[in-house]
Amino acid sequence: MRMVGTIAVGIVALLASPAQADSVINSEQVSWQGCAYTIKVLRGDDPYADTPYSVSLQSAVVSPDTCSLTPRTIKLVDSVSEPHIAIAVSAEGLAIAYSYEQYARFSWGRQLLRIHHLNPSTLGSVRVAGLEGIALSDTGAWAPSPFSLNRLILYPDFLEVGGFLEGSTNALMDDPATIPWPPPLAEGSHFVAIYPDFFGATRQPPQIFTY
């Protein structure tokens, strides 16, 4: 009877305990005109989840005299593997980037990088661009393959992202695609993608380099 009573008490305590929140495992923040913007990588507490990671973006007021936005938090994406994140701001605007693994049932998920030009007030996307990592064979067959973001830099005339090619990744495609198929094979284990006039009205394809 004592054992049953102990188990019953334990079950009641478990049911009454609040659900655990996702854990922040990485974050980056910038400030602009009295507002703060934070991009975060979170991990859920479900060990069996198909996409245990997620990326979120949060805005906050630091100085009410210059920042008049309404603070908010939005989820950007779920990921199978741990995402890599970056955020940057300049006189031209606010930008974020993140690399992640898309979930796909019964197959390998796409390995993607997304870049957003954001509306600072609403966190809505003004422009979205991206890259996809692949393992490309001599026959033209390909499969998703990992790569990771390392940096996001804003220059007066262009935006630059860079990072590492991993595993069997030997090519990068822009997504949506503007580069003719097949993409050039990578040389080395690093990549740089340059987006001319990223904050402008004219959408130009990226210049992708590997070394």
Image (cartoon, grey):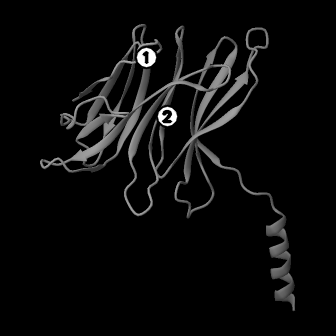
Amino acid residing under circle 2? Ile
Amino acid residing under circle 1? Phe
Q: Position of residue 10 (x, y in %)?
A: 81, 74
Q: Which sits in the foreground, 115 or 140?
A: 140
Quadrant housing residue 7: bottom right
User: Which residue lies under the disc numbered 1?
Assistant: 198
Q: What secondary structure is marked by label 1?
A: loop
User: Which residue lies under the disc numbered 2?
Assistant: 85
Whole-angstrom CA distance, mark 1 to mark 2, is: 18 Å
Q: Quadrant of the N terminus?
A: bottom right
Residue at (37% x, 56% y) in the render: 108
Q: Nearer the viewer, mark 1 or mark 2?
A: 1
Q: Residue furthest bottom?
A: 1
Are there few (<14), some (14-19), or many (20+) residues within 10 Å of tag 2? many
Q: Is residue 102 left or right of residue 119?
A: left
Residue at (52% x, 10% y) in the render: 92
Residue at (30% x, 35% y) in the render: 173
Q: Position of residue 102 (x, y in %)?
A: 45, 48
Q: Position of residue 66 (x, y in %)?
A: 74, 9
Q: What secondary structure is marked by label 2?
A: strand
Residue at (41% x, 12% y) in the render: 197
Q: Is residue 72 left or right of residue 110?
A: right
